[in-house]
Image: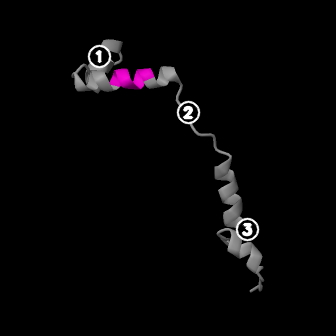
């Protein structure tokens, strides 16, 4: 077990977290993952789909596949 000294001026200014190096490296990999930012077109499509769902303008999976000709 190693002993670590943390300076008071470092710990007083900000929150300080100590984690094993392996966990820190896993965290850094997650940090690099891009997040999805919807465009205005995505937002309009989502609003339209929510409206259609509320109005009952939806197809079941079976109806959808039948219309595509996947399932007879």
Indicate yes or no whether the magenta region holds residue 41: no
Q: What residue lies at 28% left-to-right and 21% top-to-bottom?
A: 52
Residue 71 horizontal/vertical position (percent)? 31, 19
Name the N-terminal-most of marks 1 and 3. Answer: 3
The answer to whether 47 appears left or right of 53 in the picture is right
| Residue 37 circle label | 2
Which residue matches tag 3? 21
Helix, strand or loop status at disc 1: helix
70 shown above or below 7: above
- Tell me the distance, in whole angstroms, between the alpha carbons under discs 1 and 3: 54 Å
- Tell me the distance, in whole angstroms, between the alpha carbons under discs 1 and 2: 34 Å
> Residue 56's quadrant in the figure?
top left
Residue range of the region highlighted in magenta in the rendering: 44-49
Q: What residue lies at 24% left-to-right and 26% top-to-bottom?
A: 54
Residue 45 horizontal/vertical position (percent)? 42, 21
- Tell me the distance, in whole angstroms, between the alpha carbons under discs 2 and 3: 31 Å
Residue 6 horizontal/vertical position (percent)? 76, 80
Residue 12 horizontal/vertical position (percent)? 69, 75
Nearest to the eye among marks 2 and 3: give it: 2
Tell me the quadrant of the picture where the C terminus can be found.
top left
Does the magenta stretch mainly form a helix, a strand or a loop? helix
Q: What residue lies at 36% left-to-right and 17% top-to-bottom?
A: 70
Which residue matches tag 1? 66
50 shown above or below 11: above
Question: Mark 3: few, some, or many residues within 10 Å (few <14, many ≥20)?
Answer: few
Nearest to the eye among marks 1 and 2: give it: 2
Q: Are marks 2 and 3 in contact (CB under 8 Å)?
A: no
Name the N-terminal-most of marks 1 and 2. Answer: 2
Name the N-terminal-most of marks 2 and 3. Answer: 3
């Amino acid at each position: 077990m190693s002993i670590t000294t943390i300076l008071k001026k470092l710990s007083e200014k900000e929150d300080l977290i100590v984690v094993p190096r392996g966990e820190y490296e896993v965290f850094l990999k997650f940090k690099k993952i891009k997040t999805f930012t919807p465009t205005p077109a995505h937002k309009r499509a989502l609003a339209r789909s929510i409206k259609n769902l509320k109005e009952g303008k939806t197809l079941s999976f079976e109806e959808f596949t039948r219309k595509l000709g996947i399932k007879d």
